[in-house]
Amino acid sequence: MGFLLETLIAGLMAGVLYALIALGFVLIYKASGVFNFAQGAMVLFAALTMARLQDHMPWPLAFLLAFGLMVVLAWLIERLVLRHLVNQSGVALLMATLGIAYFLEGLGQLVWGDDIYRIDLGLPKQPTVVLSGLIPGGLLLSREDLIATLAAALLVALLTLFFQKSDVGRALRAVADDHQAAQSIGIPLSRMWVIVWSIAGLVALVTGMIWGSKLGVQFSLSLIALKGLPVVILGGLTSVPGAIVGGLIVGLGEKLAEVYLGPMLGGGIESWFAYLLALGFLLLRPQGLFGERIIDRV
Amino acid sequence: MNHTMRLSDATGPFHAKTAEPQAIAAEPCDDVLLELLDIHLGFGGIKALQGVGFDVRRGEIRAIIGPNGAGKSSLLNVVGGVYQPQRGSVRFDGRNPARMHPALAARWGIARTFQNLALFSGMSVLDNIMAGRSLHMRCGLLAQALRLGPALREEIAQREVVEHLIDFLEIQAWRKQPAGSLPYGLQKRVDLGRALAMQPKLLLLDEPMAGMNQEEKEDMCRFILDVREEFGTTLVLIEHDMGVVMDLSDRVVVLDYGRLIADGTPDAVRADPEVVRAYLGSDAA
Amino acid sequence: MFYRENGQFKTSYTADAQIFPILQDRLFVIAMLLAAFVLVPLWGSDYLLRALLIPFLILALAALGLNVLVGYCGQISLGTGAFMAVGAYAAYNLMARLPGMPLLLALLLAGLIAAAVGMLFGLPSLRIRGLYLAVATLAAQFLADWVFSHVAWLTMGSASGSVTAPRLDVFGLAIEGPVRKYLLCLTLLCIVALAVKNLVRARKGREWMATRDMDVAASVIGISPVRAKLSAFGVSSFVAGIAGALWAFVHLGSWEPAAFNIDMSFKLLFMIIIGGLGSVMGSFFGAAFIVLLPIALNRLPAMVGLQLSTSLVSHLELMVFGALIVFFLIVEPHGLARLWITAKNKLRVWPFPH
């Protein structure tokens, strides 16, 4: 019982992080129709920046500086890439973000180095036992994970609020619905794109921070972020709640599968389980849990 | 549509057809090539077509006119099997499909051109029209990869057919150019060529002259008349230019808000008070 | 001046449908083939063959396969590495389990097995497209990575899927040493490239391109997008499977699943973007580029007296790839192949501007 609960909680915590990455995908897709393969590279780049700056200054300052850099990056991406690819097919845009991803991976490691770095947020590392009154033996939880999960959940909530309530959020939703219509009522498209890529940069930074403080900052961060893809497929490319629910489902499903199915199959199934789940979903409900159905017009 | 009507239809002859999936053979020497009966089509809450029915005779040029949003393109899409009507039946060439779909329409000899350009823009003009011959080609994958004997002969034989069409449409000079790079009027001609390459019995033209200048329109009119003359194709066309419609077509169907409001010769339709009202607004009546 | 087609009139459709309709092009290609089949084996150094030409030939083959799917049929795939892995391990199993299995037959069967797997993972393409399909093919990639490192039966019980190629021979001739390996790869590449070129200029190729450009219009003229997509997945994976088997047997010798990981899939995609989508020649250009770039990055700075560390070079390589992909997508979506054609067209009318 306690073990199952621990598995579930571990799954949910991983799920929140997946949701965070997926959120980055969804934000950019909604606002610019770009399926941003570079989200993982952005996570790596942001985390590397943060980790290396932290050697010289307290982490909140490093965080702010790293965020500033992500905004500059967003601006550059809009200027140098997106602006020139307006009206291109989705596949061309996807491949462009693959190019951005490679560039960022190279640049990040070139500038900041390619070792494994630590991000130390001063979080307590020792595990803590909770609910010992309810369950015999209690539940063993990492306090660091708990705080990280709460932080991620808070960010997701704030972003959702921002999208629903703020003026900029409303404008972004208008852009997402129809680029041309939004432009015709005077919403500056390129500024919106910079904003949304900056937000995705922030999301990447937080993801990188949390993951980096847990596992160390290294190249594999960029690959972990690929887990965000099955999550968005599950949740629907255009849905913020979908990203959250999808993230939790993938996190939970993956942990449960690894614990209960893994031993039978030889372990390590975490690497593809989410993708297979997404694949099955694609065949049954291509628009995802919360996505919009696409109708072809002739 | 009122409720009683719906009930009577459900037990009527149209409903019975869905029970029998295979085509029902009808009297073979039919003068009518295409017959639409009581077509109903809706998208969500929007009713695009409400009980439309008319026929097209062999060798005829039939025009469909009507204001924007009257359901003209939807009607072509029903005939071509792109949309499935909720009720009603399409009878083509004496056969009654349980469910029309694009592949079936193509096999039976229904071709169409598109209102918005729908050429294969990355392919050459020649390849676009050759693509229209796909249904007439048989060689398998391996034979094509080896390009020996039958595959090569087939390719060359089809090329001859296509070259004849290219001559017919007077687009020889552009045959190796990517279709997407041609001016609009020429692209429309290639679209027509691709449809003709199927050697269809029925050709549906969705606004073949939209966006053309006077000269291009006259060319296109000439091609449409020549198509019937030379290939004996039956044509159904949607067109806005009333002058063109009156000159070209044998009979005209008028749609308004998804309903058929008039059907007859150009002169009769022009005089119809319903048509006048639909075009000029209700005040004019 | 000498590159002219004046006076070369086509009098039959067969002549007009040649791969190289211009006489000078034909001569050039014949010269290239002669050089590749005769001069290189005679004078090519071991380093040239081993480090440059053999990888180039095999990668060109794989890129050609991917180009069928992405460039001609417009279906994106991020899982080419998986189909190559299927080819490699299928050939390995065929050779190891069936004594006396000839190499060429094993390659052919491995290609067919890869084609079957490719078509299986191509099934989602019937319902989904673009971005969604990218994820479906990624599933193939991660699944293959796992299967070949965890299912011991497929690797004859070897731990973590690392295996060694068997002795290779063709018609009793041992494929040993770089020259014979090079000739084997070159021959196979030439045959497959010709077959692919034949396909793309025949009905199948038109069906692929029609599905790519406008699938609704394709279905209206009687082309079945379902069959077009599945056959593209099949042909593409067939070629990728053979390339995978060659990469493993001939280039690597012994290998593990990581040789066909997602990095390989991405690299192949880059090759066809940089080389030219929807172009047989583009696949060759792209492969040459990917093989040459790291070497150029290694050598060029040294020539001007700069010493770069290997890690620095590998990071620079990533950046150059990334930047070039974006550059080509923006400036010349048809890649190096189009630049080549443009240059040829200029040459055709040189010294006049038009």
Image: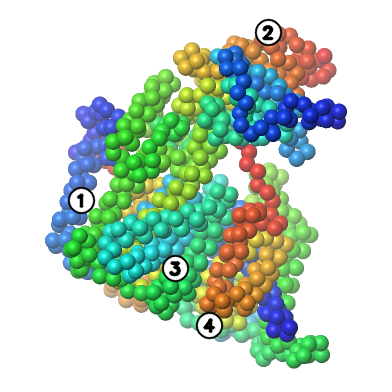
The residue tagged 2 is B267
Q: Answer whether labels 4 and 3 touch (C-beta < 8 Å).
A: no
Residue lying at 65% horizontally and 30% vertically, measured from the top left: B78
What amino acid type should be assigned to the residue bearing mark 3?
A: Asn
For residue C99, above or below residue A79 = below
Q: Which residue is mark 4?
A: A117
Mark 1, Cα crowd under 10 Å, few <14 / some 14-19 / many 20+, is some
- Depicted B227 relative to depicted C129: above or below: above
Q: Nearer the viewer, residue C41 or A22?
A: C41
Residue appearing at x 54%, y 77% in the figure: A267
Pointer 2 chain: B
User: Percent from the top left, x then y, of residue A155?
Assistant: 71, 70
Labels 4, 1: front one:
1
Q: Which residue is at a point 61% across and 31% down the rendered structure image?
A: B22
Q: Nearer the viewer, mark 3 or mark 2?
A: 3
The residue sitting at 47% across, 44% down in the picture is C228
Question: Which of the chains bears the disc numbered 4?
Answer: A
